[in-house]
Amino acid sequence: MAFTRATGKHRRPSRMQRGTVRAAGVAALATTGAIGTLAAPALAAEQPETEQTGLLPVITLGDSVADQIDAQADAQKLAAEKALAEQRAEAAAKKRAEERAEAAREAEERAAREAERKRLNTFVSPIAGSYVSTGYRTGGAVWSSGSHTGVDFHAASGTVVQAVGMGTVVEAGWGGAYGNQVVVRMHDGTYTQYGHLSSIAVAVGQSVVPGQQLGLSGATGNVTGAHLHFEARSGEEYGSDIDPVSYLRSHGVNI
């Protein structure tokens, strides 16, 4: 009787199918006792197929590829070290710049403080190039107190009268026996007075600096001739007068 296959695509039996058939055949031969020397060649003819273990194959790299990888790693390491060195150098330069800026700022502040200290401690004569014509505490009937409460500086009428130091004008106008006068409260709390002026160039509340013009000398008030009456006081009240020459000399004025 002839057998025919069904039409269509035919696949080779799978390994599991083939193995199952083979095992069944061996079992049958064993049962019949025909597994002796005749079975060996048949079994030997079957080549065992490679089993799928599920493990990834191990690839061994050549020396040239490994060297390239090592070189790339070394290059990356050097680049990282260079970048780190550049960052540290930049940080150090920034710190030095900040330190220099801070030092410059401190030097500028010291210079400003020194300039202010110098300005506060700078005193000048009320009449440039003049001299004392009548001394402090000189007695006589000319003065209502019986003695001179200040000093007189020789000055022709119209001579510039200047502030001896830094302060604020607290009086500027007529002062009775003093004539036209200016009184300045100095930065250290003392007072200076400038009398017998022919004109006044400042106003109450105005700040003045050493050498600034307060007015012009004259002969207003109780006088016998043009001159400047200069007085120094420890307080604002009359009678708190101190030696004007000693006052000026203590502030570095050469009289």
Image: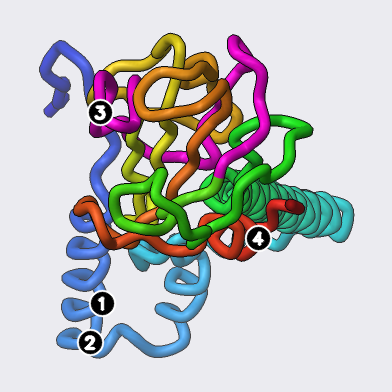
Q: Is residue 191 above or below residue 162?
A: below
Relative horizontal placement of residue 228, taking residue 56 as reference (left or right): right
Q: Which mark is residue 30?
A: 2
Q: Is residue 161 above or below residue 37?
A: above
Relative horizontal placement of residue 24, taking residue 231 as reference (left or right): left
Badge 4, how many Cα within 10 Å: few under 14, some, many 20+? some
Instruction: Give the structural element (helix, strand or loop) at label 3.
Output: loop
Q: Is residue 22 above or below residue 169?
A: below
| Among the two numbered marks 3 and 4 on one chain, the one whose residue lies closer to the N terminus | 3
Badge 1, how many Cα within 10 Å: few under 14, some, many 20+? some
Nearer to us of marks 4 and 2 is 4
Cβ–Cβ under 8 Å for marks 2 and 1: yes
Instruction: Give the structural element (helix, strand or loop) at label 4.
Output: helix
Q: Which residue is mark 4?
A: 249
Report the amino acid beneath label 1. Answer: Val
Badge 2, how many Cα within 10 Å: few under 14, some, many 20+? few
Q: Nearer the viewer, residue 183 or 56?
A: 183
* Residue 80 shows in this picture: no
Relative horizontal placement of residue 208, taking residue 4 as reference (left or right): right
Q: Nearer the viewer, residue 106 or 62?
A: 106
The magenta stretch spans which residues?
A: 152-180
Cβ–Cβ under 8 Å for marks 3 and 1: no
